[in-house]
Image (cartoon, rainbow, N blue to C red):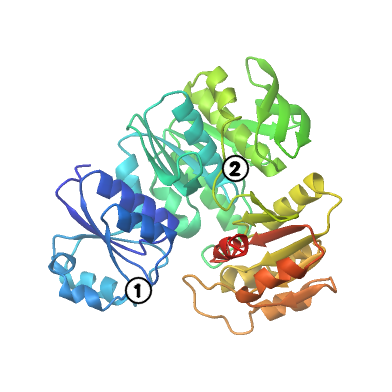
Amino acid sequence: MILNNKTFCLLGIGGIGMSSIAKYLKLKGSDVYGYDREKNNMTKSLEKIGVQIIYDDLIYINNKKLTCTNTIIIYSSAIPESNKMLMFYKKNGNIIKKRAVFLSEICNDICTIAIAGTHGKTTTSAILSHMFLYDKKKITAFIGGVLRNYESNLILKGNDFCIVEADEFDRSFLYLKPEYGCITSIDKDHLDIYESEKELVKTYKKFSRLIKNKTVLEDKIPFQGLKYGINSNCDYNISNIKSSKKGFVFDLKTPTKIYKSIFFNQIGNHNLSNALCAITLADQIGLNMKNILKSLSSFSGVNRRMRIFKFKSKLIIDDYAHHPTEIKFVFETIQSTYFNKENCVFFQPHLYSRTKFLIEEFAHELSRFDNIYLLDIYPAREKKINGISSKLLLSKINNSSKELIRKNQIKDIIKKSNAKVFALLGAGDIGVEVNKVLLQ
């Protein structure tokens, strides 16, 4: 795809997926503009490299580049059809593409590795990208989080391989035609899009059939492919696991060899599973296994994925968990790593529809924490659903130590609480509160 000397406008540019595309286009020599409702860390980083962003969908009319019919429009799923800029471009005759379509056009000409799954896409993509770079491979990678090793959600180090997250929302991953792919998990989600869990599984199967070469699957995925699992009889298996606050030491069995005493510097069994998925893919693609395994000790994680901070004598865990299963992962990691410490969770539900469809599961997992604080639902792209609220979720939590609070109360609660481990969870803007606490 020839990108230089073209002008693009990205609607919803501050989103993690859109911002990596904007950065890619800018670094490839395109003229890049964008719109979002408000500033965030992503928009600030884009503005630093010369991307011009507006935060009012009415002022575009004063910019000739933004009203030119030659400007190519890319928009995210967070942009409603009623957005004034999107409505203008449809009437104006501009080329308009959804993010998923445009991403597929970038990567379908390259050997693409697509990471799918309800949980673990971002961490698996990040670990795999780190492995490729450690093995000195030339890659482009679009990651759904900021890799701490590289302080970016875009890796642009060549185009022999392209690593992308294959998003199931809105069936976006069906646009991809990857050479290699994996499915880390299939769990009930996006039921505002899919008619049933059965329909969701069926769509994942369609995605698996788009993979041209090797398909890698977590042990429980009911499709054909190479299987990986922990303490299993899979093609790739991890066993003899020893865990600590520094990470894991384990043995690895592949189809051809056994490797002993490998160190991975992240905590959480879910992260160990993500690492095994990345190992499986990297080995099948042909990376040097010695480098694959060595890279695990220098992977420094992804922002908002089990990110641990010290605050005086307390620990704060910042995590993107926005699904009951992901909350379960965080709780179990706290229990196994900090089992003798009182814990506390602050949870910001993400989307009215997800809260509606999974409210019983949310209540069950949240009830397991010692202390529970809920924030209002973060709506993102959605309009309010009558009767669905954090207050309703709170009423279903089976724990007397629970409360509905505002974001500006988090700091004081942490300071005054007797708990020693605090988890701030959600896919909205709750992560911003971590810095406010740490900057005391």
Query: In the image, what residue type sits under mark 1?
Result: Glu
Asked if labels 1 and 2 touch by Cβ distance under 8 angstroms, the answer is: no
Viewport quadrant of the N terminus:
top left
- Tell me: 275 left or right of 149: right
Q: Quadrant of residue 327?
A: bottom right
User: Residue 159, how many percent across, how many down?
Assistant: 32, 32
Mark earlier in primary sequence (2, 1): 1
Query: In the image, what residue type sits under mark 2?
Result: Thr
Which numbered circle lies on residue 93?
none
Viewport quadrant of the C terminus:
bottom right
Q: Nearer the viewer, residue 268 or 113?
A: 268
Residue at position x 33%, y 55% from top?
Answer: 46
Q: Among all residues in the image, which is located at the extreme top?
A: 257
- Tell me: 124 left or right of 330: left
User: Residue 204, how many percent across, how many down?
Assistant: 53, 48
377 vs 154: above or below? below
Q: CA distance from mark 2 to mark 1?
A: 32 Å
User: Could you tell me which secondary element the residue under label 1 belongs to?
Assistant: loop
Residue at position x 69%, y 59% from top?
Answer: 423
Q: Quadrant of residue 359?
A: bottom right
Residue at position x 15%, y 64% from top?
Answer: 65
Q: Nearer the viewer, residue 399 or 284?
A: 399
Which residue is the site of mark 1? 81
Residue at position x 46%, y 29% from top?
Answer: 132
Which residue is the site of mark 2? 184
User: Residue 304, how many percent across, how many down?
Assistant: 57, 53
- Tell me: 282 left or right of 185: left
User: Could you tell me which secondary element the residue under label 2 belongs to?
Assistant: loop
Q: Quadrant of residue 164?
A: top left
Badge 2: how crowded within 10 Å, few (<14), some, or many (20+)? many
